[in-house]
């Protein structure tokens, strides 16, 4: 069964190692602004939340792409960008509701989470498993839904529920 | 000296000199600006040579968009270049001149057919430009003028050779001069003729994909003061058609322009389009150009489009933060001291 | 490139800012971080000046591995001349400031002068601005960071800042970042306060290129596993540093009531397990998987509802054992108060404990304390006194001067109650049963200190083979080593080894908890070499790192000597020798330090360091370390940041 990235916000300690390893793996440099995961922090309350691409089933980025460069890789349950077709129009950057599609100014192309081809580094390096790579069963969606209703609407839409 | 001798003598010398100097000047401008650009420097010559090669063969990337029209244009240009150079009548003149140059001529019948073909195509282009509303809307006076100017030497040449209008005395006496003059006009026009990228105001969404694909970096955009301004210089352009092929809205076109001011526009680059930018409602960073946002809104109806990626992350996270039971419990416990 | 960060020289008096590349020779000789700071401070500071003099340089730096793939590569170092001790002032803090400084393009900041009005530095992607701090001067540490983020319109700005205590020139004011990351010791906050520098804010999005990304990622995984696979790390992951108390208190290795007892009898309320009642989770610094502190919300009393982070083992002593309080809430509130005021928790606690002992002995009376009852276990008095110290009010004004100056002001023999070395107070650990730890605090380069040379693993009584694996490399020491922590033999070597290990760690910017501090199996010299190589491309052997650490440590020693350090400063208060411990297990009971044996340890320690009998580095040593130009009597130009 396909796997998915799941965030458990109660576990995140805000260390941002996920951002560091993601940027090093994909760009060869330590630079969180070029990472595909970002920890949003509320420092006054000690609340930390890693934000990632949800690899939506009905991905808005895919719907707006004029060259069909964004496709769904069913085997790894991920949304990918085909850079041979991508023209860099950045409609997908505007369309993603989670801000998960970014534009890398250094390489001049769109960047997004690619689940590191099945061995996500953010999961491997997070000792707390605040980001985990789990079977994509409905129980996880329910867990996310319990988290928040507004957000759940978004999540439901994202994962085709 | 009568006017005819003047036209075929000193005037011809002047025109050819202007033509050669003008073309040389353009070559110099081109190389100096191309070499100054810093984009893709290691691929530059490959792009230039590839583009030149492609233009000789009908595999231009703009062809995929409108194949029939492109094919007709290609044929038109072949006739336009081949006939004047390989016409036996012209070769005789070169042989008789002080240069004494001689080269193999086209069979006369073929030259005639090619001329007629060109005239037919010219008529088609002109009619199309008058009749088809969409094309008419984006046509300037110079576009019509250019077709007529190009057709005239061929028309007068054909009439001169075959004497179809010799019945009219004035034309019978002066067709040769008219032909020479029209040819000279075309030569001068060639110095001032440019093939430039234009961004259709009604279709272009300002996404700047064309900028990313431009191999020489002549097509650039600059964001500032709530506007995205596109700049371009024809002297840095190799007319490869990458912008035309890439544009998701078919808004980028390579179109002829004719004019002395274009010849003199070496630096700075010219502004060819400016489009309003939509800014993030949270932080003021650039989201996307307004027309692109409107286009995305046709597919996506969420409110998130009003924000930049950084703020979207924060707002989505805020969704959790507001409503997650755990976070709610937390907030109740915390008060600021 | 991790090596292309710059050093900025900032003169606050004139507003002049100069940015320069860091020469590769400096990297090869001093690596970076604390080591390079020592060199820059020694070279640029005029000797013998007052710590509050505008010419006193304050150096803020990020180690060479900060922001790269080294575990917990987050540490900021700050160095200057200390207003507390008048010797080397040096502090280290975690959080996210150092990585952000590196992403903004800088590794070292050299700041001097005095701004005409309160200012802060704004560093962003290679640019440095000096900005007016009038809107944040006077604000506590939590609020001012929020205000700066609002003013600069970026929620992710990291700030190094001083609190009201630093503004008031409390001699042990700290610098902080985030909610609780503090560079606490030696009063660096006061130095910044004397320069009218309220904060250094930075934000950066520049690349730090990793030299060998694939290998660095793989090695980082190994390094992290090496750290978190040890039992002590796992305990810290769960409880934070307060877990140490369980063992040390039951053994009798904790100072209580200043120095009178070495165990808090019945002190179970402040055991770390009680934190579960208030903790909402754990928190850590950049890149760290040990996340050794709690996020907690105060439940009771006037501060109920306050969110804070910590508390550390140090606070357990400062607001617990040293002052005789057995109340977790006091520790939680005390930790919050010192964090928001910008005070060194350790020094504050020790000063309060000393004041209480003076009060007990009638040297301080109610008149001196404005009616505040400084009795052992008086929680309210403790919390009130913190605020008085931060604002220099009444007795707080005297205590804010630090141990020696306050004792001078109070007089009446108050000095003999002080527990200090070189004018800086000690952690609430009781070193009387542990000669090695006693040697560490006596000789530490910044004064009595538990972080500069503490051979904490000595407390585990590890078998010799384990000790040999750690302490005989990388230079092949073949002298004696002993297991028991009551011993004197073999201890100078382990103190020296730890000094250099911590110096090396501070040069890289990694966290000390990830080295041989609490576990012998943690990374040390061989791992540092690999880590530096994969991330920056610089090649060092473990022995070369040892030599560099030795070089930098020697420069610190030279700085102290230049500021007047002599052998008699490397000594302990008389109480260590004259008052044996009164409680605890047999291994800790009735113990005191033997003067003769301690003197012999100091001699041996100087010998190992190749210092002469007065503790001055010999010319031969300086030549060997290639810093011959630094011999104390030699010429040195009065630098202007060159």
Image: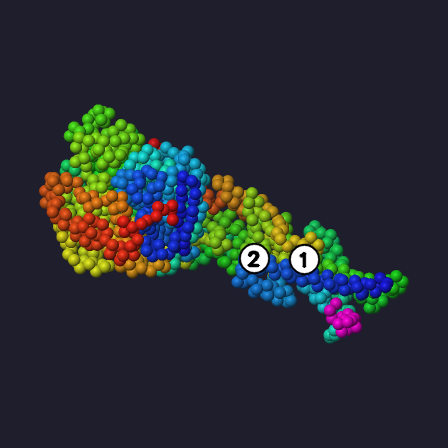
Label 2 SS:
loop
The quarter holding residue C263 reads top left
Residue at 54% x, 57% y is B38
Q: Nearer the viewer, residue B71 or B168?
A: B168
Asked if both marks, 1 and 2, belong to the same chain, the answer given is yes
Would residue C496 appear left or right of C205 to someone viewing this image? Answer: left
Task: Check disc 1: other Cα within 10 Å, few if <14, some if 14-19, many if 20+.
Answer: some
- C641 in magenta: no
Residue at 40% x, 44% y is C10
Residue at 61% x, 51% y is B268
From the image, tell me which residue sits under label 2.
B37
- B90 in magenta: yes
From the image, tell me which residue sits under label 1.
B194
Q: Position of residue C359 (x, y in %)?
A: 18, 29
Label 1 SS:
strand
Q: Nearer the viewer, residue B166 or C102?
A: C102
Quadrant of the snapshot with the N terminus of chain C:
bottom left
**Magenta part of the chain:** B84-100
Q: Earlier in the sequence, mark 1 or mark 2?
A: 2
């Amino acid at each position: 069964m396909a796997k998915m990235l799941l965030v458990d916000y109660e576990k995140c300690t805000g260390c941002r190692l996920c951002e560091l390893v993601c940027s090093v793996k994909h760009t060869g440099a330590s630079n969180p602004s070029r990472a595909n995961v970002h920890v949003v922090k509320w420092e006054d309350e000690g609340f930390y939340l890693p934000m990632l691409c949800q690899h939506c089933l009905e991905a808005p980025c895919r719907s707006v792409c004029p060259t069909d460069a964004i496709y769904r890789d069913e085997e790894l349950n991920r949304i990918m960008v085909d850079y041979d077709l991508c023209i860099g129009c950045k409609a997908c950057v505007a369309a993603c509701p989670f801000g998960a599609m970014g534009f890398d100014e250094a390489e001049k192309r769109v960047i997004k989470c690619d689940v590191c081809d099945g061995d996500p580094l953010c999961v491997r390096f997070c000792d707390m498993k605040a980001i985990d790579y789990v079977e994509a069963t409905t129980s996880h969606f329910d867990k996310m839904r319990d988290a928040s209703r507004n957000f759940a609407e978004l999540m439901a839409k994202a994962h085709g529920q | 000296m009568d006017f005819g001798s003047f036209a075929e003598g000193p005037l011809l010398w002047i025109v050819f000199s202007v033509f050669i100097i003008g073309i040389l000047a353009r070559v110099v401008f081109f190389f100096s600006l191309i070499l100054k650009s810093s984009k893709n420097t290691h691929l530059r010559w490959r792009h230039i040579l590839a583009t030149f090669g492609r233009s000789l063969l009908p595999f231009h990337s703009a062809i995929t968009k409108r194949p029939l029209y492109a094919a007709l244009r290609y044929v038109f240009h072949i006739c336009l270049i081949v006939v004047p150079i390989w016409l036996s009548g012209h070769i005789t003149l070169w042989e008789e001149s002080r240069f004494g140059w001689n080269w193999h001529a086209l069979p006369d019948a073929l030259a005639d057919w090619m001329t007629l073909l060109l005239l037919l195509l010219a008529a088609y282009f002109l009619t199309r430009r008058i009749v088809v509303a969409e094309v008419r809307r984006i046509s300037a006076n110079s576009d019509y003028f250019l077709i007529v100017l190009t057709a005239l030497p061929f028309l007068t040449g054909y009439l001169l050779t075959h004497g179809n209008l010799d019945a009219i005395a004035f034309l019978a006496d002066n067709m040769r001069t008219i032909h020479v003059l029209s040819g000279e006009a075309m030569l001068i026009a060639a110095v001032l003729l440019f093939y430039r990228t234009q961004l259709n105001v009604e279709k272009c969404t300002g996404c700047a994909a064309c900028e990313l694909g431009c191999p020489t970096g002549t097509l650039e955009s600059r964001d500032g003061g709530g506007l995205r301004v596109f700049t371009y210089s024809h002297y840095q352009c190799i007319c490869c058609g990458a912008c035309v092929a890439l544009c998701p809205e078919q808004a980028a076109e390579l179109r002829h322009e004719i004019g002395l001011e274009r010849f003199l526009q070496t630096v700075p680059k010219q502004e060819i389009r400016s489009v309003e930018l939509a800014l993030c409602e949270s932080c003021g960073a650039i989201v996307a150009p307004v027309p692109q946002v409107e286009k995305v809104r046709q597919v996506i109806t969420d409110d998130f489009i009003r924000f930049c990626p950084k703020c979207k992350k924060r707002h989505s996270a805020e969704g959790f933060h507001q409503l997650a039971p755990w976070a709610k419990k937390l907030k109740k416990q915390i008060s600021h001291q | 490139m991790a090596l292309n960060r710059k050093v900025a020289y900032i003169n606050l008096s004139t507003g002049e800012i100069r940015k320069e590349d860091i020469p590769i020779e400096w990297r090869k000789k001093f690596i970076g971080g604390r080591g390079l700071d020592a060199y820059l401070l020694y070279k640029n500071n005029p000797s013998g000046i007052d710590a509050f003099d505008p010419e006193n340089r304050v150096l803020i730096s990020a180690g060479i591995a900060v922001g790269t793939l080294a575990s917990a590569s987050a540490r900021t170092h700050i160095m200057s001349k200390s207003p507390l001790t008048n010797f080397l002032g040096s502090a280290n803090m975690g959080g996210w400031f150092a990585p952000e400084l590196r992403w903004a393009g800088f590794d070292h900041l050299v700041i001097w002068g005095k701004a005409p009005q309160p200012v802060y530095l704004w560093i962003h992607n290679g640019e440095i601005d000096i900005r007016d701090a009038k809107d944040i001067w006077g604000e506590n540490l939590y609020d001012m960071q929020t205000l700066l983020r609002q003013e600069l319109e970026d929620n992710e700005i990291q700030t190094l800042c001083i609190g009201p205590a630093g503004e008031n020139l409390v001699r042990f004011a700290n610098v902080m970042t985030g909610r609780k990351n503090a560079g606490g010791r030696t009063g660096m906050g006061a130095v910044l306060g004397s320069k009218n520098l309220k904060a250094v804010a930075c934000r950066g999005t520049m690349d730090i290129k990793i030299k060998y990304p694939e290998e660095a990622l793989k090695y980082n995984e190994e390094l992290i596993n090496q750290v978190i696979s040890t039992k002590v790390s796992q305990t810290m992951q769960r409880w934070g540093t307060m877990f140490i108390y369980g063992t040390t208190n039951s053994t009798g290795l904790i100072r209580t009531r200043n120095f009178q007892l070495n165990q808090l009898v019945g002190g179970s309320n402040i055991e770390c397990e009680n934190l579960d009642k208030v903790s909402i989770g754990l928190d850590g610094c950049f890149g760290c998987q040990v996340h050794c502190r709690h996020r907690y919300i105060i439940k009771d009393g006037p501060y109920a509802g306050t969110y804070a982070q910590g508390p550390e083992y140090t606070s357990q002593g400062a607001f617990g054992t040293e002052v005789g309080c057995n109340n977790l809430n006091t520790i939680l509130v005390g930790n919050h108060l010192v964090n928001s005021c910008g005070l060194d928790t350790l020094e504050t606690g020790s000063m309060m404990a000393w004041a209480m002992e003076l009060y007990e002995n009638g040297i301080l009376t109610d008149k001196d304390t404005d009616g505040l009852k400084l009795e052992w276990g008086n929680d309210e008095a403790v919390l009130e006194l913190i605020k008085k110290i931060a604002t220099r009010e009444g007795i707080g004004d005297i205590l804010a001067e630090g141990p020696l100056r306050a004792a001078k002001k109070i007089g009446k023999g108050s000095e003999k109650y002080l527990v200090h070395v070189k004018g800086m107070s000690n952690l609430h650990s009781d070193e009387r049963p542990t000669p090695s730890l006693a040697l560490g605090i006596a000789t530490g380069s910044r004064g009595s200190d538990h972080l500069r040379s503490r051979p904490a693993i000595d407390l585990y009584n590890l078998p010799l083979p384990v000790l040999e694996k750690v302490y005989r490399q990388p230079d092949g020491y073949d002298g004696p080593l002993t297991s028991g922590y009551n011993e004197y033999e073999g201890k100078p070597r382990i103190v020296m080894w730890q000094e250099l290990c911590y110096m090396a760690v501070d040069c890289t910017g990694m966290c000390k908890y990830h080295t041989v501090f609490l576990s012998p199996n943690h990374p040390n010299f061989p791992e540092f070499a690999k880590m530096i190589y994969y991330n920056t491309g610089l090649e060092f052997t473990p022995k070369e790192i040892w030599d560099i650490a030795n070089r930098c440590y020697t420069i610190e020693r030279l700085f102290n000597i230049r500021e007047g350090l002599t052998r008699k400063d490397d000594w302990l208060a008389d109480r260590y020798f004259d008052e044996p411990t009164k409680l605890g297990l047999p291994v800790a009971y009735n113990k005191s330090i033997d003067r003769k044996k301690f003197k012999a340890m100091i001699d041996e320690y100087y010998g190992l360091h190749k210092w002469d009998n007065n503790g001055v580095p010999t010319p031969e040593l300086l030549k060997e370390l290639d810093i011959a130009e630094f011999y104390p009597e030699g010429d040195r130009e009065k630098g202007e940041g060159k």
